[in-house]
Image: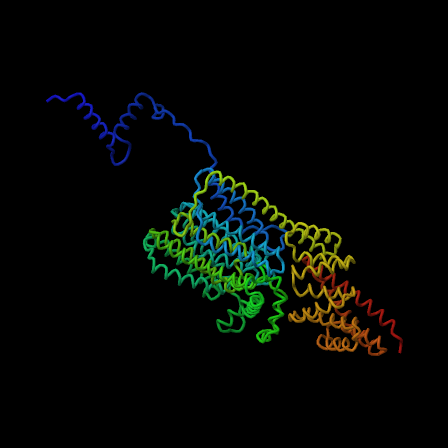
Amino acid sequence: MMLSINSKNTLHRRWTSQLRSCRPASGPPIIARVMAKRRKSEGKTPDQDVQPRAAPQNRVPFDRILIYALAFTLFAIPLFLIPGITEYGYGKTMFALVAVSILSVLWLLAEWQKGNWKLRIPWITLPFVGFVVVSLLSLLGATNGRVVVQSLLLSVFFFQIVFLLANVVRGRRDVTLLLGALTVSAFFTALYGLLQYLGVMQGSASGGANTIISTFGNKNFLGGVLAYLFLPSFVLILRLRSRIFRVITLGVIAFNFGTMMLIEQMATTIGIVAAGVFLIAGFLLFRPIEPVRRNRPWLIALLAVLALTFLIEAPSGPLNSVIGLSQETDTPKTWIATMWERNSGRTREIDWWVGWEMLKAKPLTGVGLGNYKISFLEYKAAFLDTPQGAAYADLKIPRAAQAHSDYVQVIAELGGLGLLTLLAFLGVLAVSYWKRLRRNPDESDRLDLLLYAAGIVVFLVHALVSFPAHLPASMLVILFLLGIIHAPVYGDACIFKRSVRKRTTAVLAAVLAAGGVAVSAFAISDLAANILMGKGLQQLQFGNTTQAKELLERSIALDFAPRQTYYYLATTQVRLGDQEGALENYEKCFTRFTDENSYLVYADLAVTLGYVEEARDAIQFLLSTNPVEEVELKARYIEGTVAIHLGDYSGAMGLMESLAEDAPDFELPLIALGNLRQGLGQTDEARAAFAAALELIERKLDETRQERNSRTRFTAEQIGNLNQAITRYESERSYVLEQLARLPSD
């Protein structure tokens, strides 16, 4: 039977198609191998017969640049430390502002390059917007509006980290890179802290675990960062594929855990226990069994390494004393009493009561975002005047930087509206997290999300008795966890999506770049102001008052919201003889940097200049705050001098006699009594008072000189204080000798 030409062609095409599709277990198709042999016999390579494809258009891979820039930022902020900064966290904050500005511009450029931007807005953005609005309303009750603006700007810029992560982290490789950068950074900070603990590197002079300050300035700040990252870092064990990297990660996690144990931070330990309970409940509910089964040997190895680390480095571990890391403890106490005492429990109680007084005074909008520290003394005095306050008369707290509870501080600074915003944020976070877990079918993803959330649980528990939300490195960890939980790599649940045109993206990039430049300029300016303040203070302590004044004035000019710089400048002006200028700057401290010394020196200077009523008001307020003993004695002395200036000599006599009896080593009331009795014609009594004062002064002068001469190493502050004390005692001695010479002889 003959086939038609068309039928032959059709059959040929089918056979050819089948031959081309035939593949052995491995290797190229049959025809491709035949052609390769033919080319080889002809001396040609496969590429020589193939027309080269058009090269793809060269474009800057902003997506990858952004991810690596994010990784660098996460790695750098915990480690960032610049010489000359007076507070470790301040430098990190300024660095973060500049970094976030750059990252935001890179993000928009990456989206503009794509041309089709799908903006992802996590649900938690809504309560954050509410926080911004409430913070602006808190300006109504704020003592210092600039502090409100500064604090709000920091909050907005730090929250951009959540936005970035929630939009750009699309692959698991990116998750591993970013989490690994943060974990390795924590390792280096822990290593630095351990070297300080062992005495290899210089740390705090406190001794024991308090020697650890690392790059944070406080062991508890380091402990918090290590605790928040502890459970989330387990994701690296689950996600890494290289055995070498997994082994290294095991060591890093164990080392961070061991350093955390050395710090003995009870609140974070309780937080980890709570997070462990949360993990067990989440595992039973969502059952991410497959990744656990697949990584069973590595997880067992991790638990074994952690158990061994606990036995070696935990204070209660049986192997601790063998390697010499344990610390001697005093008489045994109950667990609760020890925990509360070690964490300054009663001090925290006062901080919280003061926050309650702030809320009562301004229940709607609070005292202003960031204004807790400025308003502390005012409301501390109000609390001590209550029946509850009487129980804390033995505690002396000269000032408070934070409320030692982020929840209390939010309510105190933002009032009832702030409380609603806080509850809304926690509620939306819980709902978002629940939905993202439920809607994610991948068991490995669910286990990752559980571990991230465990880190947030530790943070939330720690924030009950501390202030991690006010520390840049601590907030970096939590913002990373919040952002990564809402990243596209883990699904799209609880995300608002908005399409943004390319032209709009370009406009936003330009606006954000301009804003970033402005904020970065302010950040760099504030950083320079802080360094100048530190240099000015150092010159003041060395006695170089002219140079100190110049440096401090330059610092104030560069600082957006200067605070204690006014105090140091006023002190410098006093030494230079500009008393009126000093009084004005001391008064500025009442709305910027309030502590007991600022009221004390203001009152002392006001009396000298004849502003007796202002001095009396300042002293009465200062005494109502239950100041520390040294300040209280000096305040009572100034109270007596105020009475002298007001002509109340009998009242002044009673105040000075009472003070001399309560403080027999305080020479100033004895000098005042000598003057009063001399004025009343009581020569013998005056001579006795001056003689007693002279004996005290000469003894203190000898002791101070001996201390200065016997020591070989001083800080600038120490040598400055010693020199200032010697100058003061010499001046007092000259005055007393002069008064004794004026007394009539017997």
- Quick one: 147 or 328, which is closer to the camera? 147
Residue at 74% x, 66% y is 604
Residue 157 picture location, percent across and down:
53, 50
Would residue 111 be seen by someone viewing this image from the given angle? Answer: yes
- Quick one: 99 or 188, which is closer to the camera? 99
- Quick one: 532 or 390, which is closer to the camera? 390
With 246 as the anchor, is 18 left or right in this view?
left
Residue at 49% x, 71% y is 336
Which quarter of the picture shows residue 26?
A: top left
Residue 292 picture location, percent across and down:
34, 55
With 548 as the anchor, is 514 left or right in this view?
left
Residue lying farthest to the right in this orientation: 745
Residue lying farthest to the left in this orientation: 1
Residue 7 higher or lower than 461, as above or below: above
Which quarter of the picture shows residue 33?
A: top left
Q: Quarter of the image containing the N terminus?
A: top left
With 100 as the anchor, is 574 left or right in this view?
right
Residue at 47% x, 34% y is 59
Residue 721 picture location, percent across and down:
71, 61
- Quick one: 723 or 158, which is closer to the camera? 158
Query: How was this image coloured?
Result: rainbow
Residue 321 picture location, percent across and down:
49, 65
Q: Quarter of the image containing the C terminus?
A: bottom right
Residue 510 higher or lower than 639, as above or below: above
